[in-house]
Image: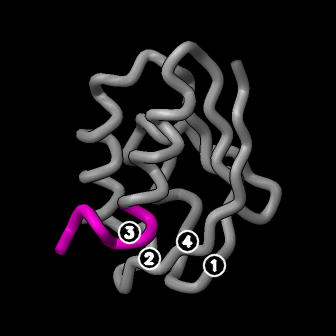
Amino acid sequence: MEIRKKIVVKNPEGLHARPASELVKALLGVSSEVYIVYKGTKANAKSILNILSLGVNPGAEVEVVATGEDAEKAIKIVEEILYGEESQ
């Protein structure tokens, strides 16, 4: 199963070190492949270096692509962190 979802980053830190670290940690239990696409660049959401290379600031729109059995769970995790719900 592949799920794609566009998400506006509401986390006040954007997708920089702290939220990127939270994202990688949160996705440890997910078997699906998860990617974040921003300005035509696709980054593995399970790699902090890949995420940081995107340079996503607050208010930016990204597309999240998850492929696998638990793709819905992966999308939900990414959505919570990009909305800043995990860091509060």
Q: Residue at x 30, y 68 (%)?
A: 85
Q: Is residue 64 above or below residue 40?
A: above
Secondary structure mostly taken by the magenta-highlighted segment of the chain: loop
Q: In terms of sequence position, does the residue under pointer 2 or pointer 4 come before the other?
A: 2
Label 3 close to label 4 by CB (< 8 Å): yes
Q: How many marks?
A: 4
Single out the mark in the foreground, 2 or 3: 2
The residue pinned by badge 1 equals 60
Q: Secondary structure at mark 2?
A: loop
User: Quarter of the image holding residue 73?
Assistant: top left
Q: In terms of sequence position, does the residue under pointer 1 or pointer 3 come before the other?
A: 3
Could you say where residue 68 lies in the image, as x and y percent from the top left? Answer: 59, 16
Label 2 close to label 3 by CB (< 8 Å): yes
The residue pinned by badge 3 equals 16
- Left or right of 20 on screen, residue 66: right
Q: Secondary structure at mark 3?
A: loop
**The disc labelled 2 sits on which kind of residue?**
Gly
